[in-house]
Every structure is written in C-alpha cells, then in structure tokens.
C-alpha cells in the first residue's frame, strides 16, 4: 500500500489546512457545515481530490475510500469513462429547457434491470424521489398515511424523518411511537406516519391492519443502513407484500443504497416485487440524482398529456444530461460480473474483519451484503433497529476504531458502514483488515 501514507490523524491537529478551512467555513455556514452527515468533531477533514479507490485530504494524506460518498460512487473517483462522458456533455451544454435522449437511455437501462419498474422519472436527490413516490401513492390510493420501519432513513422529506433516531426509554413499548427527529417537524406530520418494527411479523401485521383504511403506502428498505444493514427477513417481506395486496396499499422499496446489492437491485437479491421503487446514488455516476419508478398504472399520476397531472412534478435539473450520461456509463460498467466481483470482495472483507475480532477477543460482527457492510461492536443477535442500537460503550469503541483506521489510511463511516468500489482489489481489502488488526491490538 505504498500509495497510502499512514500518518497520525492529521484531522485532529489544530494547525492544519482542514482546521483553517473550517474556521473560514464557520463564518459563512452554520457550524461551518452544509451537510450534517459530513461534520465530524472537532472539525471535518477537507477533501482535495480523489482517484480510483483513493481520496486525498488537503494535507496531502491519501486514504483508501471505503465510504465512497456514502455509497454513491460505485466505481470510486474520477473513473476515466465516466469523466469523459460527463466532460463531453458539459462541452455540449450542461442543461436545457428541453428533454434529451440521455434521459431515455438511462430510463431504458433501469427499466430493463429492475423487474418491477415499468416506467421511471428522475429527480435530483434520493429525498426528492421518496417524496414524489409518496405523493404518487397518495394520489393513486386517495389515502394519506404512510407506514415506515422504526429507525429507517429515507431522506429529508418530513414524513420520512419520523422515528428516524428514536432512542431507548422513549421509543414506545412494544409498539414504536411516531416521534419527531427534527424540531422542524409539524405535529400533524406525526399523525400521518405509522411506525412498525423491521422483521417483527406479529407487530407489523397488527399495526398495518389497524391503520389500513388510511394507509397510502408502506415504505421499506430491505437492507436499511440506519437499521444496521440488517437484512429484512424473507417471511417478513412476504407478509408486507401480502398485506399491501390484500389492503390495496402501495409498497415502496427504497433502494437508494440497497440497489447496490445486485444487478436487478435489492428486489432481485431479496426476491420480492415492489409497486414503486426509489433509486439514487450510484445511478448518477457521481452526480446529483434520484429516481422513482414502478407500475405504469401508478406512474400515470405524473402523465401530463391529458392536462394537469394528478401529481405535477417539475424540477429545473431533473434528468439533467450530465447526470444522465454519467449514470448510463456507470451503470453499463456494472455488469453481472462486476456485481459478483464486488460481492466476493465484500465477503472477504466481512470474513477478515470478523476473524480479527475473534483473534483479538473483541465482541463484533459484520452485517450487510454485496458491496455494503457494517461493523457492529457486539455479538448480540441483530434483527431490528432496537437490537442494533449501539450503547454508549459500543459508540466509544467505534469512535476509536474509526480514528485508528483514519490514521492508517482507511476512510469508513464513523458509525462503521463500509461501501466498496470496483476500483478496489484484494490489496485494499487486505489493507483494511491489517489496519484493523493494528488498531484493535494497539
Ligand atoms: C435509503 C435512503 N433513502 C433516501 C436517501 C436520501 O437520498 P439523498 O441523500 O440523495 O437525498 C438516502 C441517503 O443516504 C438513503 O440512504
């Protein structure tokens, strides 16, 4: 790993370029920040550039990027084919007040890959895609409540923030309460959102049946990052699908991250069919993107050909051609073999991490599948949000591992999430495992 320089955690030094930039940022951005996720105390490390599977900070320190802009970059940084496609498009014009062929080409690819997506629309973020999917479900059913899993993250649309970070003592026993995440949540939103526990068949069925007459949609993520990347159980997915069929509720699969797990998305790897699917992240080749697609009878709520659609959906940068061409190239590169290779690397990494924990007598395990994995510093059985909720000691140990890895040339998420890219090989996986061994034995 000669290209990755192990250094002391430069971000913790007070006199660094990152510290100086952060001081500057604080004057013009609240808390120096414009994206909550990337704030890490005492200040974030500022990026300089990226190439392949490496990211350089402004101090000149290179690290292997096991985070990939929170899973959005499946080919790492500055892939030559994606860069060429985007720059060629920029030279021909970045965005127009007319649609382009590039939108059709990416739509065709996604409709061909995901069995349940008959028609699709593009947005500029995953949050917008989820918001539009929910509006579509409401317009289609004539109902207004939404059901979501406790702890699941589906972006920043008001309804989706409900019970996103419920904590012990306040989360409700046994039924999850609808709790605000943000002080910006209006109380009326809480009345419109029903919360159920992932993988609990009896409670999920009771809660859904109780609200069925008012429910427009159930939104699930079969591999939800904020529920610890714990896979949804097959019998739970069948139950939810069955309830949606019986009670005429729209089933939305949020695959903004979990689409990464298979050529045909999470519905292929988990074996179920949604009515609507939301996508984002990797489908934009590193540019801002979101998409919602599914049954054409539901998607018809957006059809403008008969006058004002049931759900009007504008957006100055929707389907902008730079994102569309970059996304098409990125997805074309994701062949079935590319997914298999990433799955193999992910399995090797997970096995290697668990072996280090065993050798060192550390309580720990790895969840997830394919190119997304998550470290948990516990051996208890993980089956839902509550079982995966880390206690204060687990959080403190994770912070040490995160810092130790950063100092040894590895960037992962502070909470332990890892996202692989096709730019990686066994060498990077070995680097991670060896760095972790050093951290836990140090
Ligand atoms: C499952 C899921 N849904 C929705 C979103 C929101 O996407 P965006 O950040 O593009 O708004 C995210 C983002 O991480 C996500 O992980």
Image: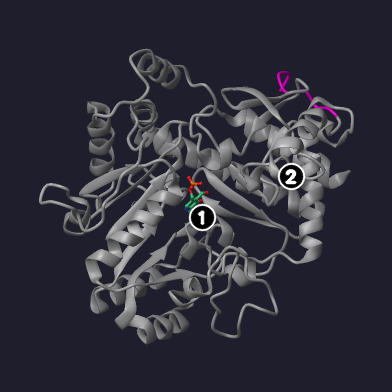
The stretch of residues the image draws in magenta is: 1-7
Residue 189, position as x, y percentages in the image: 48, 71
On the question of residue 59 being in view, the answer is yes
Residue 26, position as x, y percentages in the image: 76, 38
Is the shortest distance between ligand 1 and the CB of mark 2 under 8 Å?
no
- Badge 1 crowding class, 10 Å Cα cut-off, few under 14, some 14 to 19, many 20 or more, is some
Residue 392, position as x, y percentages in the image: 79, 64
Residue 4 is left or right of residue 54, and the answer is: right
Task: Say what secondary structure mark 2 lies in.
Answer: helix
Residue 99 part of the magenta segment: no
The answer to whether 159 is drawn above or below residue 266 in the figure is: below
The residue lying toward the viewer, choosing from 192 and 284, is 192
Is the shortest distance between ligand 1 and the CB of mark 1 under 8 Å?
yes
Q: How many marks?
A: 2
Question: In the rendered image, which quarter contains the N terminus?
Answer: top right
On the question of residue 361 being in view, the answer is no
Q: Which image quadrant is residue 121 in?
A: top left
Residue 4 part of the magenta segment: yes
Identify residue for label 1: 156
Residue 24, position as x, y percentages in the image: 77, 31
Which numbered mark, 1 or 2, is in the foreground of this view?
Answer: 2
Residue at far left of view: 306
Identify residue for label 2: 31
Q: Which residue is at a point 58% across and 63% down the rendered structure image?
A: 184
Residue 272 is left or right of residue 285, and the answer is: left
């Amino acid at each position: 790993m000669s290209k990755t320089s192990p250094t002391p955690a430069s971000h913790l030094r007070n006199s660094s370029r990152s510290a100086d930039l952060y001081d500057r940022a604080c004057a013009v951005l609240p808390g120096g920040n414009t994206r909550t996720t990337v704030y890490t105390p005492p200040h974030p490390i500022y990026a300089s550039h990226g190439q392949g599977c490496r990211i350089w900070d402004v101090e000149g320190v290179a690290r292997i990027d096991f985070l990939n802009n929170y899973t959005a970059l499946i080919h790492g940084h500055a892939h030559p084919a994606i860069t060429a496609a985007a720059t060629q498009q920029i030279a021909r014009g970045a965005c127009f007040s007319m649609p382009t062929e590039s939108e059709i080409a990416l739509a065709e690819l996604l409709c061909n890959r995901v069995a349940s997506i008959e028609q699709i629309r593009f947005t500029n973020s995953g949050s917008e895609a989820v918001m539009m999917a929910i509006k579509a479900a409401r317009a289609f059913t004539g109902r207004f409540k939404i059901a979501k899993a406790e702890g699941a993250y589906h972006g920043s649309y008001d309804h989706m923030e409900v019970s996103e970070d419920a904590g012990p003592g306040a989360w409700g026993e046994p039924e999850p309460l609808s709790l605000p995440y943000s002080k910006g949540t209006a109380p009326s939103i809480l009345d419109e959102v029903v919360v159920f526990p992932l993988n609990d068949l009896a409670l999920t069925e009771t809660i859904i049946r109780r609200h069925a007459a008012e429910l427009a949609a159930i939104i699930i993520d079969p591999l939800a990052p904020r529920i610890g990347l714990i896979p949804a159980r097959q019998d739970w997915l069948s139950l939810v699908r069955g309830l949606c069929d019986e009670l005429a509720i729209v089933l939305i699969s949020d695959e903004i991250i979990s689409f990464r797990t298979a050529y045909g998305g999470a519905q292929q790897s988990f074996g179920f069919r949604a009515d609507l699917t939301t996508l984002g992240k990797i489908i934009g080749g590193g540019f801002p993107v979101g998409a919602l697609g599914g049954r054409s009878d539901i998607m018809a709520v957006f059809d403008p050909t008969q006058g004002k659609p049931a759900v009007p959906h504008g957006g100055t940068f929707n389907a902008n051609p730079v994102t569309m061409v970059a996304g098409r190239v990125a997805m074309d590169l994701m062949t079935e073999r590319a997914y298999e290779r990433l799955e193999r690397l992910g399995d090797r990494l997970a096995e290697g991490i668990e072996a280090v924990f065993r050798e060192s007598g550390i309580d720990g395990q790895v969840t997830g599948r394919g190119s997304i994995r998550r470290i948990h510093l516990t051996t208890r059985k993980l089956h839902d949000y509550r079982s995966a909720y880390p206690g204060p000691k687990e959080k403190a140990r994770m912070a040490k591992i995160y810092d130790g890895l950063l100092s040894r040339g590895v960037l992962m998420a502070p909470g332990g999430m890892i996202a692989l890219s096709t730019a990686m090989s066994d060498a990077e996986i070995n680097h991670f495992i060896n760095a972790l061994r050093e951290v836990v034995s140090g």
